[in-house]
Image (tube, rainbow, N blue to C red):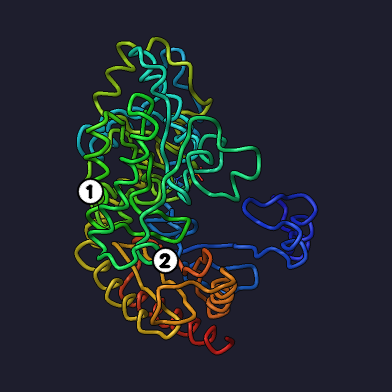
């Protein structure tokens, strides 16, 4: 690769590269920030700025940047066998080993893996497989999925339809038919006078109302993120998920946990369903599965679903060229080895997550912060005009973006959704780095408040 200077790269970027989730006209004017290097919890940009990445890339770099072991494993696998597919009664060793490893790591009887290249594709897979699951049992009319408004399940046609982002539905004529949404559990804005645990039950029972409205014989599955990430880290009350599970069991509706963010240690346990005490039939995985070092997604199915697909399903008319790609699976195995052997998830649970929680909650005292929330290694600060009320700014998102930009100027990457400042650092963050993170966040809040 020839070396190009930053300015040239920015010009080429503006001329030739359409960015995802960006106002591309505004971006071209401003010039892209180029990232050049990563190490642990830090990344460096082309101007030489060192940035503490409190967002782990996009919720994914769980083991931190710059681990040479993953590159070494990829190089070895590429040299030995760069590619072979799992169609036509074939497969490769890393593919099989990863399926077995995921069966071991995931809880309950989630023992069967199907591989994709991303979380979105994994959710597309789930939509087709679940409808197929009911159809082959002579219940083709049981095909409706229920998701949640403002949920995020990816950007493909099925993923964006299952998700409940209005702005996404508006582009491309979504959602596709037979997908419905209920309101999410967000006590801060929606809880009224109820205490959070009471409210959790009220929010969960929206699913029961929706199932009864549609008819249980029509409803195939409910899909949800254990913690809703993209919309602003909505952490449900502990009462929510067990009640969702009760409802799903009562009406024989499959329960799908989209663990793309929550999986692999993010919430303090290995998986979000363990943190929140429920038992999914199907699980979506991506992001932390490779710590973002290489693209990979997976669907885990429980024994019940796998058995129907295996014995009554006939030939599975679904798959990706790169399903179970050997290089991606080898890298995932190495990532999981590091997470396990270096006790990264255990260390968060026993030490750093508790410390991060204590320090993050201190930020709740800032005059601009209406709520500081956190579970494990994922959290948010809700910026508000008046601390004494659970109300948003009238023009939503302006203050959040300003705070994000000021944090960046101070060498800290935080993400903003509306006026929620989102936190999701690499799981390897140290106590000293937590201190740095909290100090820089406090400064960004002060500077933002100073401008209001
Ligand atoms: C990121 C994300 C997805 C989509 O994954 P991609 O790899 O971007 O396709 C799906 N679900 C959740 C909860 C996510 O956060």
Outermost residue on the front side: it is: 213
Left or right relative to 211: residue 250:
left
| Residue 262 in the image, given as x and y percentages of width and height | 35, 51
Disc 1 and disc 2: Cα gap in Å?
21 Å
| Residue 186 in the image, given as x and y percentages of width and height | 37, 60
Circle 2 SS class: strand
* Residue 301 visible, this angle: yes
Q: Which residue is mark 1?
A: 274
* Residue 428 visible, this angle: no
User: Does residue 95 lie above or below 315 as drawn?
Assistant: below
Circle 1 SS class: helix
Q: Residue at x 43, y 46 (%)?
A: 148
Q: Residue at x 58, y 79 (%)?
A: 409
In front of the other: 347 or 143: 143
CB within 8 Å, label 1 to label 2? no
In front of the other: 91 or 388: 388
In primary-sequence order, the first of circles 1 and 2 is 1
Q: Is mark 1 within 8 Å of ligand 1?
A: no
Left or right relative to 358: residue 62:
right
Q: Can you tell which mark lies on residue 423?
A: 2
In front of the other: 412 or 49: 412
User: Does residue 370 lie above or below 54 as drawn?
Assistant: below
| Residue 418 in the image, given as x and y percentages of width and height | 53, 66
Q: Residue at x 33, y 14 (%)?
A: 137
| Residue 129 in the image, given as x and y percentages of width and height | 41, 24
In front of the other: 369 or 326: 369
């Amino acid at each position: 690769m020839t070396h190009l200077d930053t300015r040239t790269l920015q010009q080429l970027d503006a001329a030739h590269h359409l960015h995802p989730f960006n106002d591309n006209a505004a971006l071209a004017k401003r010039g892209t920030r180029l990232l050049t290097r990563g190490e642990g919890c830090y990344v460096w940009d082309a101007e030489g700025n060192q940035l503490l990445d409190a967002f782990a890339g996009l919720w994914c770099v769980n083991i931190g940047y710059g681990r040479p072991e993953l590159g070494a494993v990829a190089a070895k696998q590429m040299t030995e066998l760069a590619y072979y597919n799992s169609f036509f009664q074939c497969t490769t060793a890393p593919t099989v080993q990863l399926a077995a490893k995921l069966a071991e790591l995931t809880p309950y009887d989630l023992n069967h893996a199907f591989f994709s290249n991303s979380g979105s594709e994994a959710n597309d897979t789930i939509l087709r497989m679940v409808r197929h699951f009911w159809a082959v049992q002579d219940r083709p009319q049981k095909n409706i999925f229920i998701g949640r408004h403002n949920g995020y399940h990816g950007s493909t046609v099925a993923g964006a339809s299952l998700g409940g982002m209005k702005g996404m539905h508006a582009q491309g004529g979504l959602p596709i038919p037979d997908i419905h949404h209920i309101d999410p559990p967000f006590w801060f804005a929606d809880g009224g006078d109820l205490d959070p645990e009471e409210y959790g039950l009220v929010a969960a029972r929206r699913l029961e109302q929706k199932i009864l409205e549609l008819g249980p014989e029509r409803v195939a599955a409910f899909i949800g993120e254990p913690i809703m990430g993209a919309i602003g880290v909505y952490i449900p009350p502990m009462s929510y998920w067990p009640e969702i599970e009760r409802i799903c069991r009562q009406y024989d509706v499959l329960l799908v946990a989209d663990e793309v963010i929550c999986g692999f240690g993010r919430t303090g346990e290995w998986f979000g369903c363990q943190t929140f005490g429920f038992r999914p039939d199907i699980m979506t995985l991506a992001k932390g599965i490779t710590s973002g070092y290489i693209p990979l997604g997976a669907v885990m199915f429980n024994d019940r679903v796998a058995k129907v697909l295996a014995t009554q399903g006939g030939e599975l008319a679904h798959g990706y060229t790169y399903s179970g790609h050997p290089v991606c699976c080898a890298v995932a195995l190495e990532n999981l080895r590091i997470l396990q052997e270096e006790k990264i998830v255990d260390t968060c649970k026993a030490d750093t997550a508790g410390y991060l929680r204590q320090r993050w909650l201190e930020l709740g005292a800032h005059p601009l912060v209406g709520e500081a929330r956190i579970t494990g290694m994922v959290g948010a600060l809700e910026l508000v005009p008046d601390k004494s009320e659970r109300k948003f700014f009238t023009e939503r998102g302006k203050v959040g973006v300003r705070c994000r930009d000021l944090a960046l100027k101070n060498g800290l990457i935080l993400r903003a959704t509306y006026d929620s400042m989102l936190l999701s650092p690499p799981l390897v963050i140290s106590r000293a780095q937590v201190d740095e993170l909290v100090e820089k966040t406090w400064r960004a809040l002060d500077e933002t408040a100073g401008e209001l």
